[in-house]
Image (cartoon, helix red, strand yellow):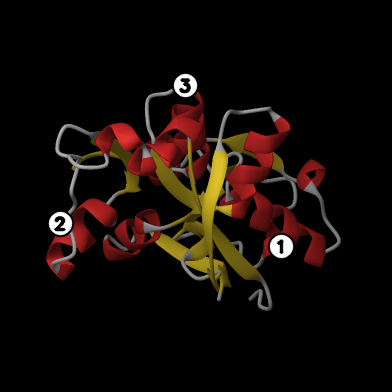
Amino acid sequence: MMRGFARRAFLAGSLGAVALPYSRAYATDLSRVTLRVATFRGQDNTLLPAAGVAVFPYRVEYSEFNSGSLISRAIDADAIDLGGWSEIPMVFAAASGARVSIVATLDGPTTNQAVVVPANSTAHSIADLRGKKVGYIHSTTAHYFLIRMLQQQGMTMRDIMPVPLGMSDGLTALKSGSLDAWATYGYAIQFLQADGSVAQFGLLA
């Protein structure tokens, strides 16, 4: 169990997207404006309409992504105008010189992050993963917290066989037996728990 870490969520976008709602050209009519927004599965495009707050003076076009690192790349490539993620992808985006600007931040807990292993695994702790094949979602909070959990056991990424995988590939690899463990987050944990295919430890709360 790992406690005491705060998670900061960032809302970021391209410079053009940030300036768009305030442009004089659209001051009286935003109906011709389309804001391309990145969202995670089951979040903004589902929660906002359900809460009755999805009424905007402009059109909103949602695209689903599985990680913040993919969202930052999409903004940098001008495929998306606005998206949110944790602080870790922002570090990688800044280091790469990506054309991304932070427009808002939100502090929150590090819940819904875990290391999962197959239900029949003999591993019961992070220390048991020494020399094992461990998947993780690159440039995300899953990547960062895996490093931190290893550090708590006096280990580094060199003590495991790290395998960077996207969300879909990680799900497939774990369920097929290609991984000994997977550092992941979000809906993947619930999917794996629901079908009874994994045990879980290293939960972050």
Residue 55 is marked as: 2
Dot in front, 3 or 1 = 3
Q: Secondary structure at mark 3?
A: loop
In this image, 96 relative to 35: left or right? right
- The x, y position of residue 87, in whole percent, is 61, 53
Dot in front, 3 or 2 = 2
For mark 3, what is the residue?
77
For mark 1, what is the residue?
149
Dot in front, 2 or 1 = 2
Q: Secondary structure at mark 2?
A: loop
In the rendered structure, which disc, 3 or 2, sits on the residue that comes first in sequence?
2
Above or below, 70 relative to 200: above
In this image, 81 relative to 144: left or right? left
- Crowding around mark 2 (Cα neighbors within 10 Å: few <14, some 14 to 19, many 20+) is few
Amino acid beneath label 2? Val
Q: Residue at x 19, y 52 (%)?
A: 56
Q: Nearer the viewer, residue 106 or 70?
A: 106
Amino acid beneath label 1? Met
Q: Residue at x 55, y 76 (%)?
A: 205
- Tally of marks: 3
- The x, y position of residue 35, in whole percent, is 28, 37
